[in-house]
Image: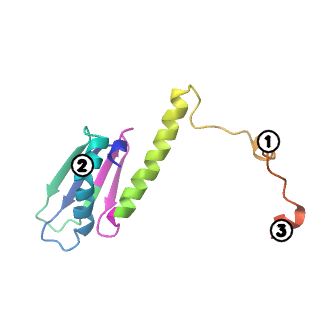
Amino acid sequence: MLKFLSKVRIEFNALDPRTAACMEFLAQCNARKAKESNSACQVLVKRRTDDHPPQIAVTFVNGVEEVFDATTTPAQTIRNMILEKGQHLETEQMFRDAGEQWPVIIPVEELHQPAPGTKPRKAEEKKQ
């Protein structure tokens, strides 16, 4: 998960009962496997003393920052969103490394061509 991130900022009040997602996410970030995937990723923890709701802010390696409300978003959901966006970043980088244009523009006429190895759908199948 951390390999797609350059910075993680976790903010919470330790006395707030809504900190479960922050604590779980922090544990995931501190796991040996996560740290080995990107030791350069900064993991910052800000312990608050006010009533500000717990939040997790992540900065992706491309500079995009996303802030999650940790009171309503479970840590596993945040992790899955990071992994999904990370796969998009890897795909984009793969195309750029190959010298291809990103995003890939598919001409409209190619969208309607049958793909090799597939058979076109019959009219009655399309209606269902």
The disc labelled 1 sits on which kind of residue?
Glu
Image spot of residue 31 (x, y percent): 24, 52
Badge 3 or badge 1: first in the primary sequence = 1
| 79 shown above or below 38 | below
Who's the residue at 73% across and 39% down the image? 107
Who's the residue at 24% across and 49% down the image? 32
**Which residue of the protein is positioned furthest toward the bottom in this rendering?**
17
State how far apart marks 2 and 1 are (Cα).
Answer: 49 Å
- Nearer-the-camera pick, 101 or 76: 76
Q: Which residues are magenta?
A: 57-75
- Residue 32 badge: 2
Q: Quadrant of residue 55?
A: bottom left
- Residue 79 badge: none
- Residue 127 badge: 3
User: Is residue 81 left or right of 107 when viewed as pictured?
Assistant: left
The disc labelled 2 sits on which kind of residue?
Arg
Who's the residue at 25% across and 37% down the image? 40
